[in-house]
Image (cartoon, rainbow, N blue to C red):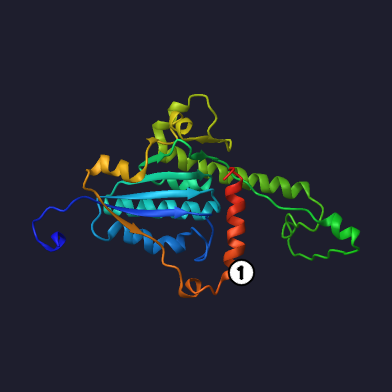
């Protein structure tokens, strides 16, 4: 009732958004710029919050989607002049750490996994299997590089060199973002290599300047904004057809892929 009475001071409000899962493209991905557009906008605007808290649990995924989501968070924060706090649960690695860096402060549990500032590309080669089965691969292209890294053809050293160039450029974009967002805090790392894909647990990440401290969302926000701080949770609304189980096959396959991504970090 107090919110409707003029001139009555309200208790501080923190909007909370959970960013959990693998980062990918499209509305069906666990985390994507398209899928998070509305929930992030609501978090920064609904109820005139004092701050936004991001609860992150992601092993990474698409670097482009990570960049788009990160920049959306920064645009909203600057437009509405709100501080953003990130809280890592199990893992904020690779693209997950990219998202965490969109916050002004990053906190984690002592057992959280943080880092993996690198870029990876994986595939397979099946040309020998096809040859043993008597299957002939036929590919016709207009353009020398159009059939780059075809998994059904022998590996081409020129293709590998081109891929490594692309990965190196993407790695540079990731490093620039981390340095831009973490700034002087990274000086704590000294000679420790931060950008080689290594991971650290909470206190180790804090010692290197990758996070600001050890802490959990509700306790930290009440310490910062007062013991009477209120929390408004904002989540993504799933499409109707997903709510009624009409995408069970895709959901099951997506769940397997997501578990595989988390398993890279022993989770």
Circle 1 — which element? helix
**Residue 51 placement, left or right of 255:** left
Q: Quadrant of the N terminus?
A: bottom left
Residue 198, placed above or below residue 131: above
Label total for image:
1
| Picture coordinates of residue 109, whole percent (x, y) | 43, 39
Depth order, front residue of 144/168:
168
Q: Quadrant of residue 179?
A: top left
* Residue at the far top in the pictured view: 191
- Residue found 49% across the figure and 66% down from its top: 27
Depth order, front residue of 261/167:
261
- Mark 1 nearby-residue class (10 Å; few <14, some 14–19, many ≥20): few
Depth order, front residue of 93/155:
93
- Residue found 27% across the figure and 54% down from its top: 80
Q: Which residue is mark 1?
A: 249
**Residue 141 placement, left or right of 260:** right
Q: Quadrant of the C terminus?
A: top right
**Residue 254 placement, left or right of 3:** right
Residue 10, placed above or below residue 252: above
| Picture coordinates of residue 156, whole percent (x, y) | 78, 50
Residue 69, placed above or below residue 245: above
| Picture coordinates of residue 144, whole percent (x, y) | 75, 58
| Picture coordinates of residue 140, whole percent (x, y) | 79, 66
- Residue found 73% across the figure and 54% down from its top: 149
């Amino acid at each position: 009732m107090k919110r409707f009475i003029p001139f009555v001071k309200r208790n501080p409000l923190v909007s909370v958004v959970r960013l959990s899962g693998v980062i990918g493209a499209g509305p069906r991905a666990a985390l994507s710029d398209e899928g998070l557009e509305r929930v992030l906008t609501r978090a920064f605007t609904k109820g005139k919050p004092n701050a936004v808290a991001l609860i992150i649990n992601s092993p990474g995924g698409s670097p482009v989607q990570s960049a788009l989501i990160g920049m959306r968070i920064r645009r909203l924060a600057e437009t509405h002049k709100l501080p953003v706090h990130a809280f890592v649960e199990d893992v904020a690695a690779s693209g997950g750490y990219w998202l965490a860096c969109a916050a002004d402060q990053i906190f984690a549990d002592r057992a959280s996994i943080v880092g993996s500032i690198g870029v990876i590309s994986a595939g397979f080669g099946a040309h020998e299997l096809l040859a043993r089965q008597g299957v002939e691969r036929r590919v016709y292209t207009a353009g020398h590089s159009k059939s780059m890294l075809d998994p059904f053809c022998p590996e081409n050293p020129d293709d590998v060199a081109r891929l490594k160039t692309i990965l190196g450029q993407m790695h540079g974009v990731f490093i620039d973002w981390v340095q831009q967002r973490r700034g002087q805090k990274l000086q704590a790392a000294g000679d420790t290599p931060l950008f080689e894909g290594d991971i650290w647990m909470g206190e180790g990440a804090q010692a290197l300047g990758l996070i600001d401290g050890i802490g959990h969302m509700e306790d930290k926000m009440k310490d910062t904004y007062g013991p009477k701080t209120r929390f408004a949770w904002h989540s993504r609304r799933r499409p109707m057809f997903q709510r009624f189980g009409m995408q069970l096959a895709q959901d099951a396959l997506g769940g397997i892929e997501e578990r595989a991504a988390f398993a890279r970090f022993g989770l």
